[in-house]
Amino acid sequence: MRANNVDSKISLKEKTAYGFGDFASSMFWKLFSMFLLFFYTDVFGLAAAAVGTMFLLVRIFDAVADLFIGAMCDRTSTRWGKFRPYLLFGSIPFAIVGIITFITPNLSATGKLVYAYITYASMMIVYSLVNVPYSSLLGVMTNNPDDRTSLASFRFIGAFSGGLFVTVTANYLVEFFGKGGSEATGYQWTVGVYAVLASLFFVLTFAGTKERLKPAVSPKSSLKEDFRDLAKNSPWFIMLGAGISVLIFNSLRDGSILYYFKYFIKDQTVNIFGTEYSFSQSALASAYMSIWLATNIIGVVIAKPIAGKIGKRNAFLLSVIASAGLSFMIFFLQPHQIALIFIFNILIGISAGIVMPLIWSMYADVADYSEWKTGRRATGLIFSSSTMSQKFGWTLGGALNGWLLSAFGFQANVEQTDTSLLGIRLMLSIFAGIGALLAIIFMYIYPLTEKYMSKVNSELETARANVR
């Protein structure tokens, strides 16, 4: 069979459909990264350190499982392709398990922790069964470099839009559905709304996208051979480290925002153009999270033109250098400096947004590099490693959030000590910035420049043209 490795332009309609998939995933990603720790400590009543350990153990297992899910996708063959069927058949289980994760049964402290472990682990596996093939789909929709970056940009416009939708609505929906009941009831119904929407958007992505690329050669390979190829792929290791570092940065920021505003900023009266307005800490936190994600979208939009001018690697470096420096500055801001707190949030949001589509576009390059070196294309395995890096970064960041809260003496729903407030401030600023600094080190040694990939793609196109 002749490989259908065309590099024709992807339509706006198909790019939009692809973006719907991460709108769905990111609604839950933001629930997990921004709300779940707070939900477990302040609503469900679990200890912060216990939650941090749970995040670590469950996410390590889940991150490793991503590689096997990716390898399974590579061996999937249906009339719909390798990756799209997982979006269709995984959509309803995703929604059901998502709702169950936020149910709060009346159990003992041990029973609650066991329930949290079971439901959270189940959610992470279902999330991976949909998100790994979704991520891999980018690598087989086109081999056009510009379209890959464009698809990655649409993906993250969808991602940040889904996250923004959650940050804008979550606190208000929890309050609305919790009236006459409890905050726990509010969370259950709120997540139910997001779950139904996520299921619908996954189906729209399945229906609106196509898998076009087939490997230049297709020898049967064992799982052992695929992993051996991966172990020799040095750009993959570099991207793994860079991706983990970026997600540590994001996870520390995301996980500390609600605590930062509830316990450090508190309610504030803000002077806007000569008029004073009173805002609750909850409203300020929602605004901060929403602006953070809205400005991420700006970064996503400008990522492609910046990368086109200076290259993906240099654009990545610019993004993480700015994110680290600006994060360090936040530590010195005080609650009454609310305007500066939001201005720095805008600047960090734009700089951090640039890196997100670049990661996925660069993983597509890593997949091409792997095919060029080995003669075998393992798109699912390569892209599952990218979700694995997300999970490891998210794992370390999430665990650090819980452990740091505990280490600095945090106690839920009481006035915090100076020490615990210091810990919350460090999490949002200095500790998060260190994650971005680590990404700088990895990206400095990344070898797949535009010039190098031009040679790789030229030789791959010749090989693909000869496949019958």
Image: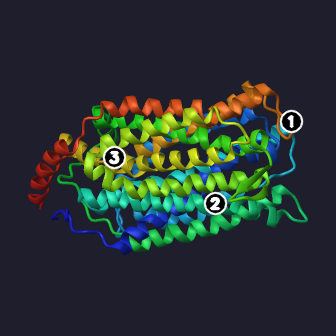
Instruction: Check disc 2 and report its element: helix, strand or loop.
Output: helix
Q: Quadrant of residue 251?
A: top right
Disc 2 from disc 3: Cα separation: 27 Å
Mark 1 to mark 3 CA distance (whole Å): 45 Å
Residue for badge 2: 166
201 to the left or right of 468:
right
For label 3, count other residues whose C-alpha is less than 10 Å away and answer few (under 14), some (14-19) or many (20+).
many
Q: Is residue 91 left or right of residue 79?
A: right
Question: If you read the primary sequence from the N terminus, does the residue marked by circle 1 or circle 3 appear first?
Answer: 3
Label 3 sits on residue: 363
Return the residue at label 1.
Answer: 415
User: Of marks 1 and 2, which one's residue comes earlier in the chain?
Assistant: 2
Q: How is the image coloured?
A: rainbow
Q: Residues within 10 Å of mark 1 (few under 14, many from 20)?
A: few
> Given this view, does label 1 or label 2 mark the residue nearer the observer?
1
Q: Position of residue 396 (x, y in %)?
A: 57, 33
Q: Is residue 315 left or right of residue 188?
A: left
* View extreme (right): residue: 180
Query: Which amino acid, mark 1?
Result: Glu
Work out whether residue 196 can be spotted. Answer: yes
As drawn, 315 above or below 60: below
Report the amino acid beneath label 2. Answer: Val
* Disc nearest the viewer among 1 and 3: 1
